[in-house]
Image (cartoon, rainbow, N blue to C red):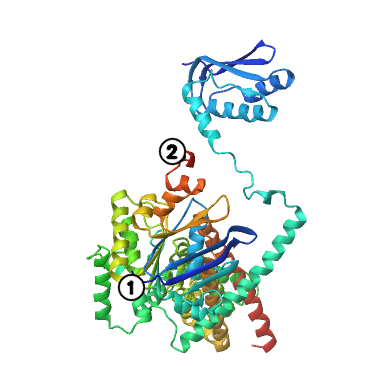
Amino acid sequence: MAEPEAHITVSELTMAYGDFVLMRDLTFIINRGDIFIVMGGSGCGKSTLMSILTGLKAPAQGKVLYGEVDFWGADLRTRDRIIRHAGVMYQSGALWSSMTLAENIALPLETYTDLQPEQIREVVKLKLALVGMAGFEEFYPAEISGGMQKRAGIARAMALDPEILFFDEPSAGLDPVSARRLDDLILELRDSLGTTMVVVTHELASIFAIGNNSVFLDVSKRTMTATGNPNRLLAETRDPNLYTFLTRGETLTDRMGKDG
Amino acid sequence: MTPRGEMLMEQPAADTLKVTLSGDWKLGGDLPGADGVQQMLASRAGVRNLIFDTRQLASWDTGLLTFLMNLQTFCNRQNIRLNREGLPEGAKKLLALAAAVPEKKDARQAEEGVSFLAHVGNETVSFFQSFGDLLEFIGEAVVAVLRLFHGKAQYRRTDLGLIIQSAGVQALPIVSLICFLVGLILAFIGAIQLKLFGAQIYVADLVGIAMVRLMAAIMTGIVMAGRTGGAFAAQLGTMQVNQEIDALKTLGISPMEFLVLPRILALALMMPLLCLYANLLGILGGASVAVLMLDIGFIQYYNETVAAVGLWNLGIGLFSGLVFGVIVALAGCMRGMQCGRSASAVGDAATSAVVTAIVGIIVSTAVITVICNFLGI
């Protein structure tokens, strides 16, 4: 495999709401083609980290580099240009409720491409088919189930063939089978399109099944305590908090006992 | 009928207090409180152990647990050992579960202790900040309108059409009712006074000028503030809650152009038209009083109105309508865009949109009146 190439570099990032510091000193690299998991307990700032990476909220300190470009140091126009190469799937789908699914997916295409309406219709049809929702073009978001809304959200995020896709808790609120299908979809899209995936989640099954790189945000220490392949982290960690998280509550001493 | 919950205390040893619980310990029943035991513990300084006997206990629920939790906290503070042995099996487990995660002490609750002066200071600062937000929002809206004139604004024509429909045609019934009645009321009040001088015919002047110059625009503005301004705030607020606005921003689509611009345009186009319509209805209301009560002929009333109401009056009225339309749309959109991420925040946004719009309408009416007076028109 080729030498990994850094896609997003986060260095010494501090996230804060006013005086309240949520996380400090975050430093990690997301490589091209990674499925990068941002994990941590509830309230640790996973979603806040995502809104910093997607340009919705400025960090209190530190840098985010997209390739070589300083994301938050650049002006608004550069930021817009960078983020146009990214797609975001929000926790609840965040489909525009006054538009049909087809219109939802068509809007970014109409805005940023010169495609003819006929071509746009074809693209929309393809993207919906890719997420397993062919034939749902004329439905409104309120008329389909939560899992479908998430998948339609992915279809919209993929509309412009982004280089990087962000997922905010893709499997939250889904039944196990739908969650699994969504995981498979993420893997499949990465393998066939080479898209970098950043997945914010605390679903252990997903973390181990799809992640090949990760960062763990420790809510009690207010900083990250580990980064790397989640399977390797589980095998090697000596950090009790991370171990408890990755094993659904076992303590590290249990393993010490087992190991010997 | 099961016996109600009761409690007996005795002291089997010098350092031990035994609490015997009997009957039905259920919420809503008249249960003895934990303070009885606490007083007992406080008065007997030597007691270091608290034990329970619950063999007589018929049934229990949260009522028993809150009692025990209170005792537990008290005992922890006083260094008394609370022995759970005698408690029902389920209650033991639930108490252990409740104690498993320690209470969070550094949670952000420091706000309560803020002094009155600090509170006034904070409110004042946030008031001035909100004024800055207002200017910023107006600035962004102006930029969006300029981009519209350059043909660069991104919005959907169909959205504009839908908003025009809901802020225009669908507002006709309520505007008709309100303005017809306002015309009628003005005519009534005027008629009673003018009759004293035998000058009933001037009811036409009164109603005509008042409606065309001012009242039609104000009444329509207030109706639209409640009807459409509140709806705008609720729509945008809900989109904020659903992260739909975030989704627009991350696609690089400006919510100002995509959502706010069509709403401002729709109201700026529709309000003058609604005002024109409201003028007619108001005059009709006045005419109905004149014809039915004052024995003035319809043609006579019409001629008097035409003679009295000048083009300037109409111009001022329509201009006010335009201004009010922009104010209502701006207030609604601003409150919607500033909305927090909860259901109650959407309600607050709608309320404050209506209040802001009505204040804006009244203040700008005053400003327009003073300017017209100054210009002598």
Residue A252 as seen in the image, left or right of residue B41: left
- Identify the mark at residue A159; answer none if there is no mark: 1
Q: Earlier in the sequence, mark 2 or mark 1?
A: 1
Find the residue positioned furthest to the top: B12
Which residue is drawn at the image coordinates 48% and 72% (left, top)?
B288
**Dot 1 amino acid type:** Ala
Q: Residues within 10 Å of mark 1 (few under 14, many from 20)?
A: many
The residue positioned farthest toward the left in the image shown: A135
Chain containing the residue with disc 1? A
As helix, strand or loop, the secondary structure at mark 1 comes to loop
Q: Position of residue B156 (x, y in %)?
A: 38, 78
Q: Nearer the viewer, residue B321 or B141?
A: B141
Q: Chain of mark 2?
A: A
User: Can you tell which quarter of the image residue B85 is in?
Assistant: top right
Q: Which quadrant would residue B266 be assigned to in this image?
A: bottom left
Q: Which residue is mark 2?
A: A260
Position above or below: B107 against B281: above
Q: Residue at x 62, y 74 (%)?
A: B194
Q: Is residue B117 left or right of residue B139?
A: right
Nearest-to-viewer mark from 2 and 1: 2
Q: Secondary structure at mark 2?
A: loop
On screen, residue A42 versus residue B133, left or right, reads left
